[in-house]
Image: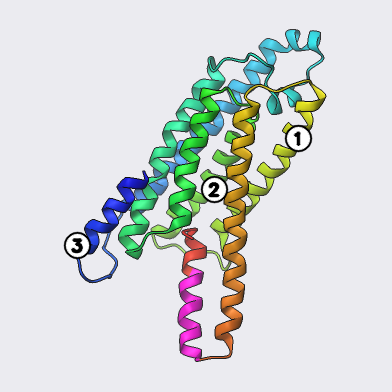
Amino acid sequence: MLPASIFLNLLLLLVFRHRRPLPLGPIPAVHSLCMALISVTIFTGILLSTAAEIRDTRWFWRRSRTTPFQWLLCFPLGTRPSGRVFFWSYIYYLSRFLHAVRTFFTILRRRRLSFFKLFNNSILIFMSFLWLEFSQSFQVVAILLTTLVYSVVYGYRFWTAIGLPSACFPFVVNCQIVLLSCNLVCHVGVLLMHFIKGGCNGIGAWVFNSVLNGAILFLFLKFYVQLHLQKRKVGGGDHRFAAAKEAENLEMVKDGDM
């Protein structure tokens, strides 16, 4: 993902000397529609599979005094990545590659690399792989939250891509912050369950996952602080320059390409 993005950016710099955006036509709108439908499908599939898994294994959990909520946050030690729930986890992992295509759209339209976007998409793919490889606890809740938010976000992106009015606030970024906040709360729950229940499966991968989520949240907060400071800095200067910078930042925030 990272090498391909850098290669595309260098290729555009060599072929096209100007930095004008390249027209993509309806491709971003089609991509957003596909991602919205895929997210809805994964959300529905893993929700139904989780409900069936809870129903079929409830008798076993009673012996270990485990509730469905505890199972969602903390897989028992020795859990293997097989069955209907992990099937949808694998589908989610594959969908991350299609989601990462938006990075190429950003390079073609803005003609510049975005460190946050490269880091975010690469980490999402890597974290999804860890979920499967180590049967990491909490992944069911994470996939449910992510696909629910992404179905809304990509539906909104399709809505605006076909020319319909957009929200008067940074809708996409706010949704991403809500998602990160919910993940943070759930991570605290996983940590508590790990000590209460005597261990959760894939806790090593979970620790690494938590560090990566913290890095993404830090980049979000850094972006907002820089945006606020930039507005204060240009507010007393040239009004045309300030308006241009504000318009550029607003476009970045609304699209979520930071």
Q: Main secondary structure of the magenta part?
A: helix
Picture residue at 55% right of the left edge, 64% below the top: 167
At 67% from the left and 16% from the top, the residue drawn is 77
The one of 151 and 100 positioned closer to us in this rendering: 100
Does 155 sit above or below residue 37? below
Disc number for residue 152: 2
Nearer to us: label 3 or label 2: 3
Q: CA distance from mark 3 to mark 1?
A: 50 Å
Q: Nearer the viewer, residue 203 or 72?
A: 203
Q: Are marks 3 and 1 in contact (CB under 8 Å)?
A: no
Q: Position of residue 219 (x, y in %)?
A: 57, 57
Q: How many marks?
A: 3
Task: Tell me the residue that label 3 is attached to.
Answer: 14
Q: Are marks 1 and 2 in contact (CB under 8 Å)?
A: no
Distance from Cα at disc 1 to Cα at disc 2:
25 Å
What is the x, y in percent for residue 80? 57, 15
Point out the stretch of residues depicted in magenta: 238-250
Residue corresponding to mark 1: 189
At label 1, which amino acid type do we have? Gly
Q: Nearer the viewer, mark 1 or mark 2?
A: 1
